[in-house]
Amino acid sequence: MKKSIVFCVAFVLVIMTQIIGCVYADVKIVSIQIEDKGMINEKVTVTVENTGKVTREVDVRLYERTSTINPWTETDNVLGFSVAAGQKANISLQDTPGAKYKKVTTEDDAKQTDSRVTSDGGDHWKTEAVGGVWVPVDKFGLLAPYIGLASTILVATAATAIYVKRVKRRKEKQ
Amino acid sequence: MNTKEKRLRTRAQIRALKNRERRIATAIFLVFILLIVIFSSYFTYNFLNQPQNQTTNSSSSQLKVAIVDHLSLTMPNQTFIQTATNTLKQEGYTVDYYPSENITVEFYRNLPTHGYGLIILRVHSTTGGYPCVALFTSEPYSKSKYLYEVLTDKVVPVAYSPEDADRGECYFGITQSFVESSMKGRFANTIVIMIGCEGLNNTRMARAFVQKGAKVYIGWSASVSASHTDTATTQLLQHFLIEKLTLKQSVQETFKEVGFDPAYKSLLIYYPLEVGEQTIENIKK
């Protein structure tokens, strides 16, 4: 009897956890794109996905980091928007002079390179790393023009040889 | 008379025909020679233009510092440059500053010949998933340049992002093979501080520098953000050059102050480990 009660309670807990997990699944950030890395007109687009079962209100806070972390926008750096269940949504911020969302001006503003995006799902860093990507090389493609040139030379050589032979043969006949 | 004229005309025609054929044969031959000359000249330039070993004039080399600021265009930080320069000058070093536009393949090729005692490589760098590191130059990638070195993976095309790569905005990058066999001369017990991404993700680049005469190579274990690497380097220079701590202590103190990179969790480390117990004074000797 005791065992079955414990089993039932455990079963209910598991089911409840699953339901809560489904409904309140985290709103996750799919991508953060930073366009125009200039000091002004920098545009940040944050795409989030609601993997839960109900519409969620998402707050996005943008920060810039120098030696300290500063809000990216001058006044209201919290951007609220709704994301329907199972949907993706994005929000963009553009840093233009005179616009509502203006970059915080600090002494080190000219060197700002990193941005942090925070959602109610936690902190997500999007930083400009001093890295890059390695571009694969098509080595055959690089050599192709030279292979073509070599082939042309070979063909020209063969043609010349044949021609010279023919001329000689003709001379001999005469 | 008619027969004679006919014969003469036929002979003249044959002669003209022969002359024409000779001219064509000569033209083909000349084109052929020209092609060979062009072909061999190009390959002589690309393939045989290998660096010659030069002996480095290492006199007073320990007092010379190079700041290679490849990030000066994309991620400028004048405060860092100024602070680092002041720290170095305070200790009697002469500082040569190289902005982004000066950073070419040829610049790296000749880097050991200047006899620097300390080189700060503030450059974009990447492993790109390969077990080696590429240091960026500002020289736009061209299919016809450094052909031999591209084919032998000494020089590789690199880009700041996959989007840039798709747009064809690529640059030349140098690999450890370039350091090993294409750089001229040798480093003179140089301390190399490579503050780009993944500089010590693996030890290949570090080993190449050390084999080329560098005393120690300091770099990040993974990707790093510009602001973090600049802050850490400033602290490292302070501990190592001003406070005269050992390299190990300097790196440890720097870590205590700045920690891991907040975004990429990378860590400043050095190669080879045995240099850790040395101070700048020991290395200078």
Image (cartoon, helix red, strand yellow):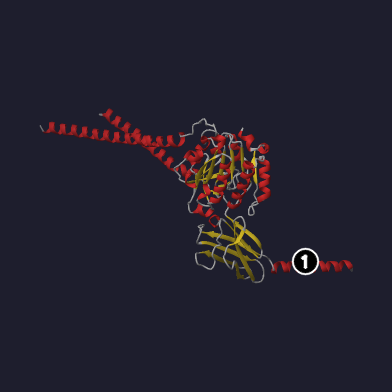
Residue drawn at x 49%, y 47% as measured from the top left = B100
Outermost residue to the right: A1
- B164, above or below A121, in the image: above
Q: Position of residue B212 (x, y in %)?
A: 57, 34
- Label 1 sits on a secondary structure element that is helix
The residue nearer to you, when weighing B163 against B151, is B163
Q: Quadrant of residue B247?
A: top right
Which residue is situated farthest in the left direction here? Answer: B1
Q: Nearer the viewer, residue B66 or A154?
A: B66
Q: Categorize mark 1 by other alpha carbons within 10 Å: few (<14), some (14-19), many (20+).
A: few
Please give left or right for residue B95 compared with residue A125 in the image. left
Front one among B14 and B16: B16
Residue A41, given in percent of the width and then of the height, sits at 50, 62
**Horizontal and vertical percent for residue B232?**
62, 48
Report x, y in % for residue B50. Answer: 48, 34
Total marks placed: 1
Looking at the picture, does residue B72 appear above or below residue B207? Answer: below
Asked if B122 appears above or below A46 in the picture, the reply is above
- Disc 1 sits on a residue from what chain? A
Residue pictured at 62% horizontal, 35% vertical:
B283
Give the answer, above or below, for where B58 lies relative to A90. Answer: above
Is B7 situated left or right of B97 in this image? Answer: left
Residue B93 placement: quadrant: top right
Quadrant of the rendering where the N terminus of chain B is positioned: top left
Q: Quadrant of the C terminus of chain B?
A: top right
- Nearest the camera: A147 or A86? A86
User: Disc 1 residue type?
Assistant: Val
Q: Residue at x 20, y 34 (%)?
A: B13
Residue that badge 1 annotates: A14
